Amino acid sequence: MTKPKVFIARKLSEEVVNQFKESLDITMWEDTDEPVDRNRLLEEAERSDGLVTMLTDQVDQELMDRGKRLKIIANMAVGYDNVDVETATEYGIQITNTPDVLTETTADLTFALMMATARRLIEANEVIKDGKWKNWSPLFLAGTDIHHKTIGIVGMGRIGEAVARRAKGFGMDILYHNRSRKEEAERELGASYNSFETLIQTADYIVCLAPLTEETKGIFNAEAFKKMKNSAIFINASRGPLVDENALYQALIKGELKAAGLDVFDKEPIDENHPLLELDQVVCLPHIGSASVETRKAMMELSLKNVKDVLYGQQAKTPVNRPN
Ligand code: DGY
């Protein structure tokens, strides 16, 4: 029996990929650092039964029109705003993502980013490395406390709840805003549901973890930043387009907001001359929320398992749609 053909749109760990070679005929994009070239992706889509794509790939109608044999596209991320799920469903293509395996790792990074921003860790590290640590002084690099403050989580999915558990350990008051109520989190973590409006006005830390959709695009705009406390710290570990970056920059330079920690940007990679990068009170990371070796390998494995299962007539473990 010929093995189903699969294209992986980024160079993944051989150790993980090799486990699937017995059942799948795998071709992998060769370059470790660069996303797959669009033309190559389209050509591979044409001859493949399954694809493993990254958040940097546009999985759109053009690709699905070319991919007449495609039965599954496994997006190696929990977010799938790069995928036209509606068209996939219509074309009978299974879309999968990688929830659960990255929850705790992404929550660790989100909390670390919040702490690094509040306690000015990056600035402090630079002071030492630049030879500028001359003496101890009472308010030298003094930051903002985290413990016993109020955190407001916008987007209380699995990662939001994992951040809330960490916040509970720090004695924080937990507010959240979400499409649906999370009664278990309310009971177990003492989290309280708030309107978006109340949350942004009340929280000391506003943490964005909502997925990117038509409804959430640009929700953190000039009006929202104006409503936050001047002492508030804004964290985004979800997707860049939820934030109006120019409005965020203006709010920071006007002192309407104290600081920001950003793991994601409107355009990635962010331009090195972007004004946000000039501000000491902004900590920027290159979209590394789920980037631990263990978790990235688990994401690779889950994506390939989904591909194998679907191509061998089984249910995907983490489906996003129900194809027609
Ligand atoms: C995701 O999975 O959506 C993250 O943003 C990538 O790590």
Image: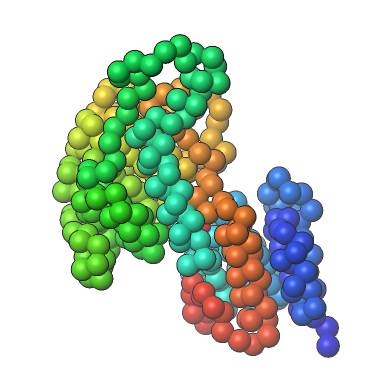
Foreground residue, 227 or 160?
Answer: 160
In the rendered structure, the answer to whether residue 84 lies left or right of residue 64 reads left
Please identify the quarter of the rendering in which residue 96 is found. Answer: bottom right
Residue 309 shown left or right of residue 97 in the figure:
right
Reply above or below: 103 against 172.
below
Q: Residue at the location (36% across, 22% down)?
A: 141
Res. 304 visible in picture: yes
Residue closer to the observer: 273 or 261: 261
Q: Is residue 316 above or below residue 286?
A: below
Residue at the spot x=71%, y=75% of the render?
Answer: 49
| Residue found at x 21% / y 65% | 186
Which residue occupies 62% across, 55% down?
Answer: 293
Give the residue furthest to the top. Answer: 134
The percent position of residue 234, horizontal first and vertical second, equals 32, 39
Q: Nearer the viewer, residue 162 or 96?
A: 162
Horizontally, residue 81 falls left or right of residue 194, namely right
Name the spot of residue 271 as percent of width and height, x first: 55, 31
**Where residue 183 sits in the image (x, y, percent)?**
22, 70
Residue placed farthest to the front in the image? Answer: 136
Whole-percent x, y for residue 262 in the image? 43, 39
